[in-house]
Image (tube, rainbow, N blue to C red):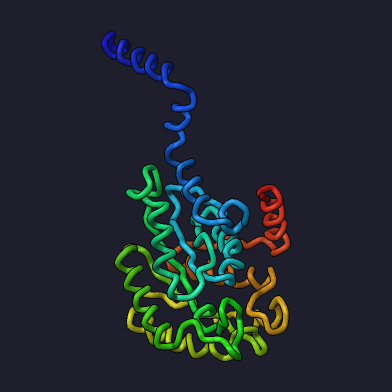
Amino acid sequence: MNRRESFKLLGVLGLVSLIPVKTLGAILKSGGDVCKEAWASLGKFTRTRYQFRYIEPISNLPKVFIYGDSVSIGYTEYVRASLKNKACVYRLHTNGQSSDYFIPRMEALRKKMFEPFLKGGWDFEWDVIHFNVGLHDLKYLSGNKLDKEKGTQVSTLEEYEENLHKIIKYLKTTYPKAKLIFATTTPVPEGAEGRFAGDSIKYNKVALKVMNQYPEVIVNDLFTFSKPVLEEHGVKKGDVHYNPEGSRLQGIKVAKEIAASLHIDTVECPSSEIIVEQFKEYESKNKK
């Protein structure tokens, strides 16, 4: 370093010393902390729920995104565990709800987290997007309550089909490099509140018709896989949801589909008891 360079360095150090600590902290906070704060502002669960916590991007690992409803919320952590040190697995910051919500919620996430909308925000691209909509399309609502006797179905088969086309076109346009995996909608058991048994089959038939028009979209037949899982590991009779072991089995299945698309291997998923303990520990520390 010559004399001129030495004087320049001393000048820079002198200027830094004059910057108030509070201001300097704000400058240094750009990047990771900026993204964490932006993520936390997306919804009420991003600070308190384990599945919705912020995931730090790792530059040399593929970036995977999961979009789905409460079934996907249940299996998200098991996907992460099965792809530990293999991929960074993110999910939507809330329940994905019906197909009408897909594009608005994806756009809300994009405009909150990614460059150039967020200075210092995410600058990567999704490598894989694994998505499902369906259980909230086929349900019947009266007001905000599930009611298959007096309620109205959220999306008709025709509306569902139209929305799926919009979703695929949106994903292909917005994330052209991402591999797309559509998961078929999981089963509706007899006696389910606000839903008729067998409707998943009807909606999956429409979904497969749509996916056949986009051969580049991979189909994960989660419906067929989940039928015996629901019988053995359903939360209770007549419920569309799964206990932790059921979610674990689904998560392993989803992780294998994602891994195959990336040409990587999965790792052994811990027991559901271990993951549940992680849930409890995290959420007890982050209660509001």
Q: How many marks?
A: 0
Depth check: 275 or 47 in front?
47
Point out the residue furthest to the top here. Answer: 3
Relative vertical location of residue 247 with respect to residue 92 in this rendering, above or below: below
Depth check: 259 or 137 in front?
137
Q: Position of residue 151 (x, y in %)?
A: 56, 86
Q: Position of residue 146 (x, y in %)?
A: 61, 81
Point out the residue furthest to the left here. Answer: 4
Q: Position of residue 233 (x, y in %)?
A: 70, 77
Whether residue 201 sits left or right of residue 163 in the image: it is right
Q: Position of residue 126 (x, y in %)?
A: 40, 59
Whether residue 174 sits left or right of residue 44 in the image: it is left
- Residue shown at 61% from the left, 78% from the top: 145
Point out the residue furthest to the front here. Answer: 143
Q: Quadrant of the N terminus?
A: top left
- Residue shown at 54% from the left, 67% from the top: 95
Residue 53 in sight from this viewpoint = yes
Depth check: 154 or 1 in front?
154
Relative vertical location of residue 164 with respect to residue 125 in this rendering, above or below: below
Residue 196 in sight from this viewpoint = no
- Residue shown at 53% from the left, 78% from the top: 136
- Residue shown at 72% from the left, 83% from the top: 237
Res. 6 image quadrant = top left
Depth check: 216 or 75 in front?
75
Res. 198 image quadrant = bottom right
Res. 191 image quadrant = bottom right
